[in-house]
Amino acid sequence: MMRDAEASQRRRQGRCNPAARPMLVVAIIGASAMTFEVFRQATSAATFLGSAGHASARAAAVEAAATEASAEVPASRRQAALAAPVAALLAAAVGAPPEALAKRPTGVNNPGLLPPTDGKSTTVIDVAKILTESQERQVMATIKEIELDSKVKLRVLTQTYPNSPGLAIRDYWGVDDLTLIYVHDTGGLGESNVVNFNAPMGVEKFKPVNFWRRAQNVFGNRYYIRDHGDGETVIDVVNYIRDEFKPKPPESS
C-alpha cells in the first residue's frame, strides 16, 4: 500500500512539475508548422478584435504579433512571398521567369479601369468601390503626409482580381524605386491575399521586408477584415504606414 501511495504521489508531481510543461509545449508546437501558423494568426486576430482608436495605438501590438519564424526565412524567399500577388499584376514589367509566373495568378493589363484624372494627382484608385468619398479624401491626405515626411510615394489600389488595371498602373503612376504600392484585394486573390504590398529596394531602406509581412498578417487576416470592413482597413493600413514613417523626435538629454 505504501509503495502504491508513493507511486501515485510521484505521478501527481510529474503532472504538476513546472519543468515538464515547457517540454510538452515545445513538442506540441514543433509537431506541425501549420499548427503554429494557425496559432500565430489567431493571436494576431485576438490582439485586435474589438480594438478601437487610431492605428498608431496598434503599432506595438503589430510588433508583438510578429513571429520569430519569418526572420529565419531567407530574405529572397520572404520578398517573393510578400510581393507575389502584386507581382502577378506587374509580371511583364518585372520580367519574372515563365516557370514562376505559371504558379501565380494571371497578370492583367486593363488601362480602361484607370481613372480619367492625372496619375500624379491621383494617389488612390478605388476599382472595388470600397471607400466612401470622405474615406478616399482621408486616405489621400494621409498619403501626402507620408510623402512629405519620407519622400516615399504611397499609392493605393483597391480591386477584386481580375477586375484590376494591373500593369497599366506602372505608367499611370510612374512607378519608381520610391513608389510603395498597396493593393487591397476584396477576395479575387484569396482571403489570405487581401492586403498586399510592393516595396522596392528604395522603400526597403526605410522598412525591411519583415515589416511589410507583419503589417500584411495583422491587417489582412480575415478576422480583422470581418470586424473592421474593407474601407476602414484601408484607412488603418495607411495610417499605420504614416505613423511608422514619421520622423522620430530627438530624445531629450
Image (cartoon, rainbow, N blue to C red):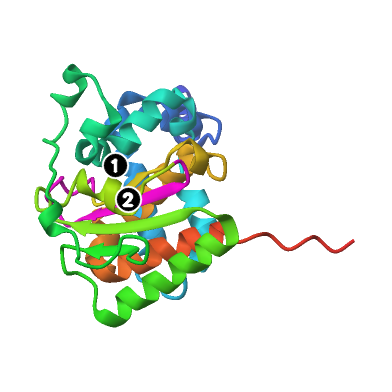
The dot on residue 38 is 1
Q: Are marks 2 and 1 in contact (CB under 8 Å)?
A: yes
Closest to the observer, 63 or 170: 170
Which type of secondary structure does the marked residue at label 2 adopt? helix
Residue assigned mark 2: 42
Closest to the observer, 245 or 39: 245
- Give the position of the N terminus as an image quadrant: top left
**Which residue is pictured at 14% across the width and 52% down the height?**
111
Q: Report which quarter residue 69 is drawn in.
A: top left
Q: Looking at the picture, does residue 152 appear above or below residue 94?
A: below
Q: Amino acid at mark 1?
A: Val
Horizontal and vertical percent for residue 178?
A: 47, 46
Could you tell me if residue 29 is visible in this image? no
Horizontal and vertical percent for residue 94?
A: 29, 31
Magenta residue check for 79: no
Magenta residue check for 179: yes
> In the image, is 240 to the left or to the right of 160?
right
- Give the position of the C terminus as an image quadrant: bottom right
Horizontal and vertical percent for residue 148?
A: 56, 64
Q: Which residues are magenta?
A: 177-193
Closest to the observer, 143 or 81: 143
**Which residue is pictured at 19% across the width and 46% down the height?**
166
